[in-house]
Amino acid sequence: MSMANIVPHMFAMSSIQGQPAQIGVAPEQYVASELAEIAEGKPSYSLSVVLPAYNEEAVIEKTVTTVATALRKWTDNFEIIVVNDGSKDHTRDIIERLIGDEPRVRLMHHSQNRGYGAALITGFHTVSKDLVFFMDADGQFDIYDLERFFPLIEKFDAVLGYRNPRHDPWIRKLNAWGWKQLVHLVLGVRVRDLDCAFKLYRSEFFQTLTLETRGAMINAEILYKFKRAGHTYAEVGVKHLPRREGQATGAKPAVIVKALRELVFYARKWKREE
């Protein structure tokens, strides 16, 4: 069965303004069976993986080695860019050691903590491959879910993961729900899981994109400008695992306040630019 016959049958083209092509729990099993039919050799595209990391010494080695193992099965042409965002623990030392075992691992280092958005931007500016995928380094995602994204990126401009189900404390889920509603109201961006850190884009999108936010607002900005450029996307449910090690920082009051300030400021700026 050819890619051309499979993808149109499974998905309808969509944009952020309309209803996205979504894959829930049951259809995912169907997708997995179809992928088995079309997997003939290694994919022809090259892939950059961006992993922002802040104080992740407990999990960073396992995350990077697992990602590298998965990528070797799919393509020889890849790179793993770990952005150490001013970690105060041994995250940097661990990555430097791993580079000796896998030279396709690259380390970008911020001397001070600049924020999640700044870490992603550093990674996006560093990529050299056809596709760019980003994932948090905290061990809450399964990199092997990415395999189901590859057929879709041939028909869509991006593939956005959504956590299904999300394994986070209730307060983080409540914050995420409120933030998603606010972003929809202010920017008109509506996706199933706005801040899910499991997304695949074409690298060329970031080559001409000026990203201005530096904190938790980054996904809202990317998708707003993605929408404004008229790009299409599909959404795919991915596994989300409980955090076993390290400490999450996304629900800290300072992070939330900064995101709200950026939303207000840049929403006004971007509306004037339209």
Image (tube, rainbow, N blue to C red):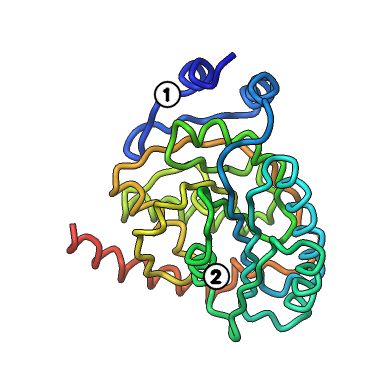
Residue that appears at 63% across and 81% down = 86
Counting from the top left corner in percent of width and height, residue 201 is at: 48, 47
Left or right, 66 with respect to 7, comes to right
Which quarter shows the C terminus?
bottom left
* Direction from residue 86 to residue 15 in the image, left or right: left
Residue 32 quadrant: top right
Indicate left or right for 54 with 235 as reference. right
Query: Residue at 51% of width from left, 20% of height from top?
Result: 10
Q: Residues within 10 Å of mark 1 (few under 14, many from 20)?
A: some
* Secondary structure of residue under mark 1: loop
Q: Which residue is mark 1?
A: 12
Residue 60, horizontal then vertical, whole percent: 76, 65
Total count of labels:
2
- Asked if marks 2 and 1 touch (Cβ < 8 Å), the reply is no
Label 2 and label 1: CA atoms lie apart by 33 Å
Coordinates of residue 122 in the picture (x, y in percent): 51, 70
Residue 33 % position (x, y) = 69, 20
* In front of the other: 265 or 221: 221
> As shown in the figure, which amino acid type bears the numbered disc 1?
Ala
Q: Residue at x 53, y 53 (%)?
A: 129
- Dividing the picture into quadrants, the one containing residue 261 is bottom left
**Which amino acid type is shown beneath numbered disc 2?**
Ala
Helix, strand or loop at label 2? It is: helix
Marker disc for residue 119: 2
Q: Looking at the image, which is closer to me, 165 or 130? A: 130
Neighbour tally class for label 2: few under 14, some 14-19, many 20 plus, Cα within 10 Å: many
